[in-house]
Image (spheres, rainbow, N blue to C red):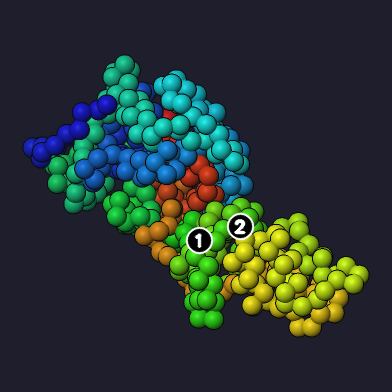
Amino acid sequence: MPEPVEGVSSGLRRFDVLVLGAGAAGLMCAAVAGQRGRRVALLEHNPQPGRKILISGGGRCNFTNVHCTPANFLSANPHYTKSALALYQPSHFLELVERYQIPWHEKTLGQLFCDHSAQAILDMLLAECEKAKEASGSVELVLNTRDIAVEANSDAFRIASSHGDFEAAALVVATGGLSIPKLGATSLAYDLARQFGLRVIQPRPALVPLILGGAEAGWTTLAGVSTEAIVQARQTQFREKLLVTHRGLSGPAVLQASSYWQPGQPLFVDFAPDVEMLRPLLATGARRDPAALRLALRTVLPQRLADRLVDVATPNGWTNAALENCERRLHHWEFHPTGTEGFAKAEVTAGGIDTDGLNSRTMEARSVPGLFFIGEAVDVTGHLGGFNFQWAWSSAAAAGRTV
């Protein structure tokens, strides 16, 4: 791996490329640029690189998804991801993983995970940075780089920092979004974008649990209950597991929908997709009362969830019409979340640097030659399941091939 630099350097140090942030996107970009013969300084404010890589996928790193398409991303410009994803696809990253003989497996919905530790992915990226030497390039990793200030003149960017001053003709910002501040998330990318005149779309937590309050707070007594459901926010829906928590709703289906949900909007849940839960009560001669309703719901739902729905969704009468109306409610149940659990629990940040100001093939700022933004800092948010890592790899490769 590149030997981390410690201590303050005296004088101005010149490179071909400066990369801010040694996370997934920053490491990938530095490796691609270095292997093109570029001299790269990779500046990281944490004491070690790749912190979010190491905790991802339960420590096994869901490093991509074989079904990745532009439709798996949320952005003000839904077409922005097309070029980068076409130029660097999941198969390209998988080839790299297999070249390093990292054991992996495919889980549901095309998600690819390491068999063992996420450390293997981080070690691979660091080894790729080290390979820059074979192309007469270099990647110098500078950790604990604090107090960063950036200035630009006609032909170079200069960074003043706790480790001294750095200068290069190209600056790549890969410092991520605001999610998981305990791992060092900051607003640096947005601050720099605004400094150079780029628009920032309001960042917000995404892939994040939702909070229930008021009359719906009683649902939290079901904490730990999980069921397959369809969860819909606005016009977008996801069919995966829903989990009730001590604060509200989570699980993959809710996390997915949270990226599309906005405060004040309802969230709709189909508790039993493709199942007519109350059909037994509609049979000729069938018993119709709360006990029969409870039995019918317990047949298809977890017991505690079924009992809760009996309490809050008992039909207004036992006619066929009343039962059919109850069935429709159970397939389109309306929740009113009071908010999210915030950036502390958000897996990613939605919003960010407006893609209208960036070249979709290179990630370079249209109005500031030599300035690039990649990864989570950009207004591109992937679905759960390896898509955000793929955006990191693809956007990083696009910039790394250009700087």
Quarter the N terminus occupies: top left
Question: Which residue does the numbered mark 2 point to in the structure image?
Answer: 227
Labelled disc at residue 295:
none
Which residue is at 76% across, 83% downward?
316
Q: Looking at this view, is 96 or 403 the one in front?
A: 96
Residue behind mark 1: 224
On screen, residue 51 versus residue 260, left or right, reads left
Residue placed farthest to the left in the image? 10
Element on which disc 1 rests = loop
- Residue type, mark 2 in image: Thr
Residue at 61% x, 41% y is 109
- Report x, y in % for residue 62: 47, 39
Q: CA distance from mark 1 to mark 2?
A: 10 Å
Picture coordinates of residue 324, whole percent (x, y): 81, 72
Dot 2 falls on a residue whose secondary structure is strand
Judging depth in this view, the residue of 152 and 386 nearest the camera is 386
Q: Residues within 10 Å of mark 2 (few under 14, many from 20)?
A: some
Determine the residue located farthest toward the right in the rendered image: 284
- Residue 72 lies, in percent from the top left, at 58, 47
Q: Residue at x 32, y 21 (%)?
A: 131
